[in-house]
Image (cartoon, grey):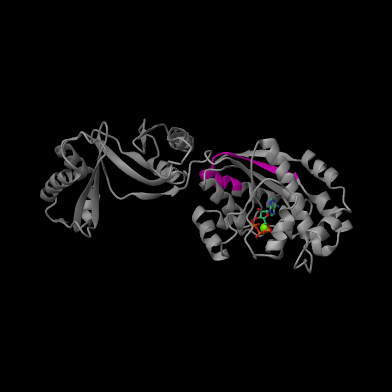
Amino acid sequence: MNHHEMLLLKLGEVVLKGLNRRTFEDKLVNNVRRRLRKCGSFQVYVRQSTIYVEPQRDDCDMEAALTAARQVFGIVSVVRAVPCEKTVEAIAATAREYLAGEFARARTFKVESRRADKSFPMNSIQISQAVGGDLADAFPGVAVDVHNPDLTVHVEIREKFAYVHGPALSGAGGLPVGTGGHAVSLLSGGLDSPVSSWMMARRGVQLEMVHFVSPPYTSQQAQDKVLELARLLTAYCGTMVVHIVPFTEIQEEIRRKCPEEFFTLIMRRFMMRISQAIARRAGAHALVTGESLGQVASQTMLALGVTEDVVSLPVLRPLIGMDKVEIIRIAREIGTYDTSILPYEDCCTVFTPRHPAIRPQVEDVRAAEAALDVEALVAKALEGEQWVRVKS
Ligand code: ATP
Ligand code: MG
């Protein structure tokens, strides 16, 4: 075979009103390049709503590149393909060789063609018929079945070459990271917040993470677990910064000075304030949490109102209407589940009230909080903030 196997990545909904297609495509191509860097040396470029990924050397890891490409948001499907000359003979010869293994297993096949190059002299039906005829002669044991074939041979006639490929694999969908703005996501070690982060990244949002720690109540292992979750998310979100914020003093002050029924809510208000400050410094325009309506006492509608009372940035809660089973299904799919269920404590589980307020009123919580020097506590936590850049 003269040509090397390569990947064709099909773009998803990159055409948005007001945002130009070029920006989207450039962003996406850059994201693909960055994500494939660890798999070898590839040439990556875009033509006609398709990203071409061509290995430049024999030692490129195509399997790893395929996996990585399927995790890049903005791509709906991925195929491994082989380019060849734009003639029926070359296409049929390439299909015979490239798909020999598939033909050995199949009892029926069909050819499906697409003509992206409209100047090509045959239309797609004619191409399919001609290539199909050649292949039927070459594999007499495999019959043509256009309705329900075991094997579909795909042919695409493009600018420079024709491409032969088998079935398409699904991509991650969504929009290219970096096209949907910049937000700060509150990442705990639980099941929910890695999923909520992933969901916002899928809408093109570039994320920075904030994680609150309460040593000695929370352990180093709990913090490492969160960094590992962030690392797992980089396969989708790219490199990201995780801000680690000390939270012990705030929690101890709340315990000392506030009514127990409001512990969790006041603590969550501090999380929001600090996250907003970090967002402002980072030039981010929203906060993201893993809250889901009714999941726990601090996630009732009234409680959510009390929590976001202290911030003016939009609080994005992509899990708000989801059931736990759906969240768990996504966590498994994106590969964060096994890490999330490791049994390390979160600062939210330290000092949880025995009887949290059921119908919290914002005025009551504000009044309870007045016992604290909120500004000083926030400032001090921000002073103690450290950050790590997490790479894949
Ligand atoms: P998760 O599974 O994400 O931990 P949860 O169901 O346990 O969520 P809570 O513990 O009430 O719910 O937390 C709600 C949200 O607050 C989390 O989804 C996360 O966005 C944020 N959060 C909780 N704890 C922390 C923390 N230690 N650091 C950063 N954010 C946190
Ligand atoms: Mg939690």
- Residues in magenta? 230-245
Q: Can you say which quadrant of the picture contains the N terminus?
A: top left
Residue at (65, 65) in percent of width and height: 294
Question: Is residue 155 visible from the viewing direction of this image?
Answer: yes
Left or right: residue 250 versus residue 128 is right
Which residue extends farthest front? 18
- Please state the horizontal and vertical placement of residue 21, each as a whole percent of the image: 43, 36
Q: Which of 276 and 18 is in front in this view?
A: 18
Left or right: residue 256 versus residue 318 is right
Q: Which of 102 and 189 is in front in this view?
A: 189
Check the image and report above or below for 130 versus 339: above
Q: In which quarter of the image is residue 156?
A: top left
Would residue 91 be counted in the magenta stretch?
A: no
Count of picture labels:
0
Q: In which quarter of the image is residue 305?
A: bottom right
Q: Can you say which quadrant of the picture contains the C terminus?
A: top right
Quadrant field for ligand 1: bottom right
Q: Nearer the viewer, residue 261 or 224?
A: 261
Residue at (23, 60) in percent of width and height: 148
Would residue 244 be counted in the magenta stretch?
A: yes
Residue at (62, 43) in percent of width and height: 183
Check the image and report above or below for 265 versus 172: below
Question: Is residue 345 visible from the viewing direction of this image?
Answer: no
- Please state the horizontal and vertical placement of residue 350, each as a whole percent of the image: 77, 59
Check the image and report above or below for 141 versus 6: below
Left or right: residue 268 versus residue 180 is right
- Please state the horizontal and vertical placement of residue 320, each as a whole percent of the image: 60, 59
Residue at (88, 57) in percent of width and height: 256
